[in-house]
Image (cartoon, grey):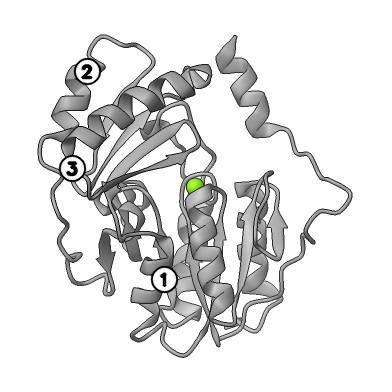
Amino acid sequence: MADAAHHRTDSVLIKPADDLPNQPPALTARHALFLDFDGTLVALADHPDRIIVPALLRETLAVLEQRLDGALAIVTGRSLESLDSFLAPLKLRAAGIHGAELRHDPSNPATDVASLGDLATRLNARFAGDPHVWIEDKRAAVAVHYRQAPERQNELFAVVTEIVNAQGSDLEIISGKCVFEARRHGHGKDAAVRALMSSPPFQGRFPVFVGDDRTDEDGIREVQAQGGFGIKVGIGASDAQWRLATPVSVLVWLRAQLIVSGLIA
Ligand SMILES: [Mg+2]
């Protein structure tokens, strides 16, 4: 029952009267594009491993990356290993684990990440046998997923906070859609955008950030501070100037950039 209610929340498209406009500007060769992955390019599933990546999305990203001379990056909470497994054979510039992993050049490995010790082991031990909770060890972050029991948010947050605080004072907990993530302070999608924008092919371009979740707001504010624009995907408050309803709307907008924008080959 709770699961059905949750899915309904994800799929209903409420558009308030004073909502953000839904036709973002066309991209040009002077833009750099930063894209969140889950909930932005692909629809959320009840488990992160069960998302479906449309072949058309892979093809669109590959062409768009070429038209932007490489100035396209995925900025995700996933590890780059996980991201790559879903986009294969495509390997893009990317920031993983909210910026804890960075890949400036797809032909080089990502910069390495700091370990969180045995935090994942301790969380796994605490939630062993709990059918609603799934722990994902991303090395630089540990995610506690509870998509099958959204009503347990407060209870789970209290337990996770206690365990994370015991692990170290330099850790923070980020709340997403039915997920808590523990990571070290100092990472974030804003820092990821700044790091990528500091060198070619991104440097000197107008950055655009597309994202659906709370951690994406950092990226959206960052690109706007750098003269670009943000696009919020789905319902919910946002500092973005534009809104697209679903990952399908995002794919349609990306496809349109190949046809009607300044990126025509
Ligand atoms: Mg997302």
As drawn, the label of residue 142 is: none
Which of pointers 2 and 1 lies earlier in the amino acid sequence?
A: 2
Q: Residue at x 78, y 39 (%)?
A: 14
* Inter-mark Cα distance, 1 to 3: 27 Å
As drawn, the label of residue 193 is: 1
In the rendered image, which quarter contains the C terminus?
bottom right
**Residue 106 is at least partly visible in this image:** yes
Element carrying mark 1: helix
Camera-side residue: 240 or 173? Answer: 173
Which circle, 1 or 3, is nearer the viewer? Answer: 3
- From the viewer's perspective, tell me whether residue 163 is left or right of residue 45: left
In the rendered image, which quarter contains the N terminus?
top right
* Amino acid of disc 2: Arg
Q: Which residue matches tag 3?
A: 168
Q: Which residue matches tag 2?
A: 126
* Amino acid of disc 1: Val
Residue 201 in the image: state x and y as whole percent: 38, 84
| Rendered view: 99 above or below 262 | above
Camera-side residue: 85 or 15? Answer: 15
Which circle, 2 or 1, is nearer the viewer? Answer: 2
* Inter-mark Cα distance, 3 to 2: 17 Å
Q: Does the Cβ of the disc 3 residue fall within 8 Å of ligand 1? A: no
Q: Residue at x 55, y 67 (%)?
A: 221
**Residue 54 is at least partly visible in this image:** no
* Amino acid of disc 3: Gly
